[in-house]
Image: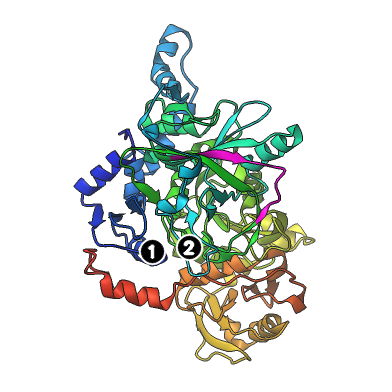
Amino acid sequence: MAFPDLQSFIRLLEARGELVRVRTPVSRDLEITEIADRLVKTGGPAVLFEQVIDSDFPLVIGLMGTRERTALALGVSDLDDLAARVRHLIDLKGAKGLGGLLGQLPKLRDAMNLPPRRVKTGPAQEVVWRGDEVDLSRLPILKCWPQDGGPFVTLPLVITKDPETGERNMGMYRMQVMGKNVTGMHWQRHKTGTKHLEKAKALGQRLEVAVAIGGDPALIYAATAPLPPIPGLDEFALAGYLRGQRYPVMKGVTVDLEVPANAEFILEGYVDPQEPWVMEGPFGDHTGFYTLPDLYPQFHVTAVTMRRQPVYPATIVGRPPMEDAYLIEASERLFLPAAQLILPEVVDYHMPPAGVAHNLVVVSIKKTYPGQAYKVANGLFGLGQMMFAKVIVVVDEDVKVNDFAAVWREVAQKAVPGRDTLPTRGPTDVLDHSSRGWGYGGKLIIDATTKRPEEVGGAVSSRDEQAGDVTSEAFVPRVAAALPTFEGVLAQAQTEDGYWTVALNKTRPGQAQALAQAFTAHPAAAGMRHLLIVDEETQVHDPQDVWWTILNNVDPERDVWPLHGLLVWDGARKLPEEGFVREWPPKIVMDEAVVRRVDALWHLHGLPPMKG
């Protein structure tokens, strides 16, 4: 199903009971975030806030807040259908001759939906603000979290054009409002927008920018998708393919850029590469931690166009699971066939919410030779944005990659610490606060596949020694009757799968390493395979919370090592005295007064009963 615009999708969700309207006044300062966070974490409906305090426009949030709503938004009955559609499109094994050509016609029709369709006018330009009329404070832009540097546009579709080639790009980069007509532009070093700005600077010119807010759901998703650098393939083309019809675009009012004709709002303006960059942030980010302030360019808004009765769409990011988890899963499904073209032994892959996209990738393979797990993992590190992956776990083809508990059971049973865990290094997400450097750090490959004879034994062992190595089979998980104590340990737990989690209140350098030495040598470690050291805020009995903390807080080359037969993961805070010179960010936590206010007003807003 192709939706002509965002509001048609809203109407469908409401008709299906997947959207509720809140008619009472609600604050865009933290309160909407608290409501949306509760609903997305419990699989609740999307919400249309009709009265946002101090704003002229309604706000909708959580449109793709479940797997089912995301599939509906992208025109499929299930997200797995995305992979089937792409696999059908790229299967070029048609017969020769006229019959073969006719057989390819359905695919050709799909491909013809890729280029956008230019129109002269559209609803996104029914109302126009220019010059002094521009006032972003009139839009219901959210301040999401208590320590945020200000309000942020969280669903912006940022459109730029390569100043040399004219190639178009659309990406989703958060925008902090810094004045009535100025925002930050969070272009990270690897982003296409940054490359366009660098070219504009070399040419001595401003970079024109248009920011669409809204458009139909396929376009919003497309702006988040990690598209490969293929000429002619851009986000409008992907949206056209997903919709099954070419995407309508029109020329901006004050910029020479094509913008979606069906958007709710369009912000037009420019970024001047000669201007000094400004401090942006903090921002409660998709990692679940605050991204600390840093310098970014300014976006000057010269015009705002909109529908006569627009709805402002928003999302929030933070501690998983959040709405972005389903957008990430859609990308997984969409790009699985392309990954399989390059790495044909790949059966499936998954980026669990606890890994907040790049921190953890689980891949299952059809294994036919020794070392294949490392071949696949290194191949994935070389595929587009997969270069940012921190930990890649490789499992056998019969393991369900989205079964979080099953994956870690396989790791405990089949990956011997040191022998089947390989550290390496490479590019990292610039939002990774634990890496050895900004955008550069350690990675880890875990081979949790069934081992072949050549893969057992040590690096210098003979074939006879390899054949006699029964390390994998010798491990029998066993929970200890009593656990040791140590300075700063607030809580600890062992699991029947072989994981020992310890919450540490770290107060001095080297404390986590000393704990690891003591605990791995203790009799209580005999039935364990992994020692997970987490901070004092982590719930040791909650595997999702534990792994979310661990994967955010480790640079695998520095913080993950084998010791006394266990694999130690040091997910405690790093200190300057330990050589970690960057500031360690706090976890995102909502203000208690806001929580209490939402508790008190929940039923008055007509929201569904809170679960649990």
Give amino acid for label 1.
Asp
Residue found at the far top of this picture: 98
CA–CA distance between discs 2 and 1?
9 Å
Residue positioned 65% across, 61% down in the render: 420
Residue position marked by numbered label 2 in the rendering = 318
Residue 302 seen in the figure? yes
- The secondary element bearing badge 1 is classed as helix
Magenta part of the protein: which range? 266-278
Residue positioned 66% across, 86% down in the render: 507
Give amino acid for label 2.
Gly
Q: Is residue 235 above or below residue 353?
A: above
For the C terminus, the image quarter is bottom left
For the N terminus, the image quarter is top left
Q: Is residue 105 above or below residue 57?
A: above
Percent coordinates x, y for residue 198 in the rendering:
71, 39
Marker count (numbered): 2
Residue 277 is a magenta residue: yes
Q: Is residue 428 above or below residue 436?
A: above
Label of residue 37 in the image: 1
Q: Are marks 2 and 1 in contact (CB under 8 Å)?
A: yes
Percent coordinates x, y for residue 62 in the rendering:
35, 54
